[in-house]
Amino acid sequence: MSQIAFLGAIEVGLVFALVAFGVFLSFRILDFPDLTVDGSFPLGGAVCATLITFGWNPWLATLAAITAGAMAGSVTAWLNVRLKILHLLASILTMMALYSINLRIMGKPNVALLGEPTVLSVFDTLGVKYYYAAPIGFAIVVTAVAGLLLFFLKSELGLAMRAAGANPHMAKAQGINTGFMIIVGMALSNGLVALAGALFAQSTGNADITMGVGVILVGLASVIGGEALLTPRTILLALLGCIIGSILYRLAVAAALNTDFLGLQAQDLNLITAALVAMAIVLPTAKRAVFKPTGRPQA
Amino acid sequence: MSKKLLVGLLSLLPFMSPAALAADEKFVAITQIVEHPALDACRKGVQDELAERGFKVGENLKWMYESAQGNPTTANQIAKKFAGEEPDVIVAIATPSAITAAAAARNTPVVFSAVTDPLGAKLVKTLEKPGGKVTGTMDMLPIDKHLQLVKRIVPEAKIIGTIYNPGEANSVSLVERLKKESADAGLVLREAAVTKSSEILNAARSLVGKVDAIYLLTDNTVISGVEAVIKVGEQNKLPVIAADTDTVTRGAIAAYGFNYYDVGRQTGGIVADILEGKAPGDIDVQGVEKLELYLNPGAAERMGVKLDSKLSEEAKEIVGG
């Protein structure tokens, strides 16, 4: 694996760490399986790319993308909380609707950003090599977001949200408005995913209607993979797990792209990636099983 | 934790092999958005043309191929991998792969293929002498010629229908062109949209009774499930005319098309020029040169059309079935 491919994997991994944060919020904190992300990821890219081609400042365009994602998340939550639609179905409905909405926003399936200013343009003026610029820039963003999330989840509102997800009945009994918590949490979650979509579009050079396909799976794989590696007991470790899980997933893809010498071919890519991710998840548990005594007295 | 991470990273080390190259060996890396008969044929064409020009895989050409399996994020990672390998030329098949390759490979020449609208995708600023590091071949269909063919097969046609996926960048630019060209040809266009291949049957049925003929573009979603349209055409005596010759073999009446193998050959020619030292910015973006008429008389009969005998004389291939 070349240095550029390695840094590229880190870069994409960092972008998807934001998705993992979002999935962590909905899936783990709120206990809300949320497929909206397959729509809010391209939504972020669509809003950001379209506004940039309209001549908006890329930072403002990114901010607008976060807002759009937050709105999408609150729609899913609203469908669930107010209209009592099952959470999974509610999120599927929003995801479906977003496909058409994203096409409307872009006016076509693909908005190219080649040669347009992006949030990464700052680094060009600083003279940093482009393949260092994106990972550094995204690392700063991910660290900042992780810090804010940590702060939020330890605040009173954040604690109430965690309670609402962990035990809704108990939370209600304590006077917590669980419906409101779900709406805020889902808005936050999808805002993060849309931010990831906006950053991804700017780093990859275009926003494409298909870029959301399977984002939820990557997010879940990152969250679960990170948990398997870290067995997190604190929020900080859980967030760290999201980042590590996401980067390892991308390194697995990068490794899968380098298996030519094993006689594996391009069409085997998804299979190899799946196998590598499964290995990463199982390895820590398997190791424990091998090294720890089984608990049964030895004869 | 950090130890686990270290172990994880170390286990990746065997994959990190530097590309060792002989001095006279050329290196071409090719990225493709998805495995698909037309795109695969295109890739084969590139390889064959290079071989004919004296660049043979295993002899004096290093050939690296990756498919993104339909995933734009993977396409991005492939582009980064190629940027790091620093090949002599990156060949990118289909629009999403081309954009990501052009964005990632700042100094390596990128030759795109099977891209419908390279200007719209901002791959190049002009088609003639595009400058920079990017050039290639585009597969914009000669829609005016196709509509003439439709009129020759169904002379009484006033309204034509088309089915496409609004989520495909290529199809959207094609439909845009089709709207304009059909107005110029005195035809009214009716569109039916699908988002996945399972919706094609209903979309085709929705056109029955409303249109005099169906003209299919090279929409990937529709062409992958084109049998549904053929079936509706045969059941309702509604002629189906295609833009690509492969679809005629599958049961459409006719197409005045090109095949992607030839597109690949043409692309391979550009790649060879660059390998021989020509600057990519000096090479014009090329349209498709070779057009062939394919006819399926059996299909015409089943769809209730009598074919002009002159057409059969012009046809390059008469296919049955």
Image (cartoon, rainbow, N blue to C red):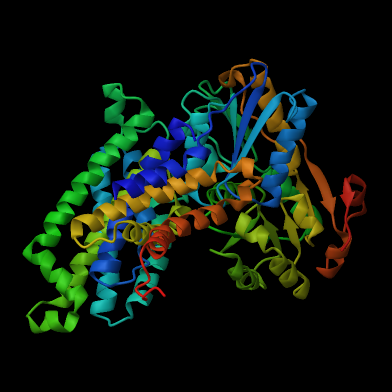
* Residue drawn at the location 43% of the way across and 47% of the way down: A250
Task: Depth check: give the residue in front, B211 or A61.
Answer: A61
Q: In this rendering, is residue B261 above or below B268? A: below
Task: Depth check: give the residue in front, B31 or B230.
Answer: B31
The mark tally for this picture is: 0
- Residue A25 percent across, percent down from the top left: 25, 63
Question: Where, by quadrant of the figure, is residue A134 drawn?
Answer: top left
Task: Depth check: give the residue in front, A170 or B199.
Answer: A170
Q: Quadrant of the C terminus of chain B?
A: bottom right
Q: In this rendering, is residue B290 above or below B53? A: below
Q: Is residue A180 left or right of residue B73?
A: left
Task: Depth check: give the residue in front, B18 or A209.
Answer: B18
- Residue A182 percent across, percent down from the top left: 21, 71
* Residue drawn at the location 25% of the way across and 37% of the way down: A57
Is residue A110 visible in the rendered image? The answer is no
Question: Where, by quadrant of the figure, is residue A260 drawn?
Answer: top right
- Residue A171 percent across, percent down from the top left: 13, 79
Q: In this rendering, is residue A3 above or below B247? A: above
* Residue drawn at the location 72% of the way across and 23% of the way down: B60
- Residue B36 percent across, percent down from the top left: 66, 52
Q: Residue furthest front?
A: A299
Is residue B43 visible in the rendered image? The answer is yes
